[in-house]
Amino acid sequence: MSSRTELLQRLDAVEERLATRASLRVTPGVLTGADPSTGEQWDAGQVWAHLAEFIPYWIEQARLVAAAGVDEPVEFGRTRTDPGRVGAIERDRHQPLTVLWSETHADIEWLRRLLESVDEGSFAARGLHPTLGIMSLERIVDEFLVGHLEEHADQLDALAASA
């Protein structure tokens, strides 16, 4: 199975999980488990706001790396403390879930189109992340997009289970 095929299958599965979570009400005040590295805990609104903001950001970063080719790694990415990231989560955390899911769903479709259009050789393109160092495009898409969606779907599952 190619990297693209596996990533698309995982994307389909996580999209289905998120669609299910978007149709359920979460009890206000319930928080995610503490992040192991920061201790940070989020409510469902923060998780959904982050989903809606990170997909387009990381798609653009992946496109930047893919366009640069395989010769030299191109600088890309941000860290958890990025003001744009933090500001978007805080700004949008009280948006209606229907709005955040609509944005997230549209961005998942955009990610699907990107994965379908990128040639297999482009997965070897490399970027230089400020804290993680050199990463292949395949790893970028896995860690910052598909895997990241899976992590937040896990958080939403846990929030629903604890409600």
Image (spheres, rainbow, N blue to C red):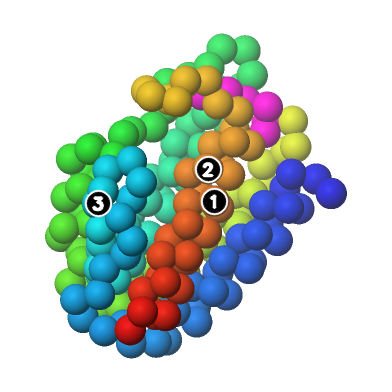
Q: Which mark is residue 81?
A: none
Callout in the foreground (1, 3): 3
Callout in the foreground (2, 3): 3
Mark 1 or mark 3, earlier in chain = 3
Horizontal side of 43 relative to 3 (left or right) equals left
As shown in the figure, which amino acid type bears the numbered disc 3?
Glu
Q: Badges 2 and 3: C-beta atoms under 8 Å apart? A: no
- Identity of the residue drawn at 47% across and 65% down: 154
- Identity of the residue drawn at 36% across and 79% down: 162
Where on the picture, by quarter, is residue 75?
Answer: top left
Q: How far apart are marks 2 and 1 (CA)?
A: 5 Å
Q: Badges 2 and 1: C-beta atoms under 8 Å apart? A: yes
Closer-to-camera residue (81/66): 81
Q: Distance between the residues labelled 2 and 3?
A: 19 Å
**Residue holding disc 3:** 40
**Segment colored magenta:** 122-127
As shown in the figure, which amino acid type bears the numbered disc 2?
Glu
Element on which disc 2 rests: helix
Element on which disc 3 rests: loop
- Identity of the residue drawn at 42% across and 72% down: 158
**Residue holding disc 1:** 147
Please check the rendered image and state whether residue 21 is part of the magenta-colored stretch, yes or no: no
Horizontal side of 29 relative to 50 (left or right) equals left
As shown in the figure, which amino acid type bears the numbered disc 1?
Gly
Element on which disc 1 rests: helix
**Residue holding disc 2:** 143
Q: Badges 1 and 3: C-beta atoms under 8 Å apart? A: no
- Residue 52 position within the rendered picture, expressed as x and y whole percent measured from the top left: 35, 61
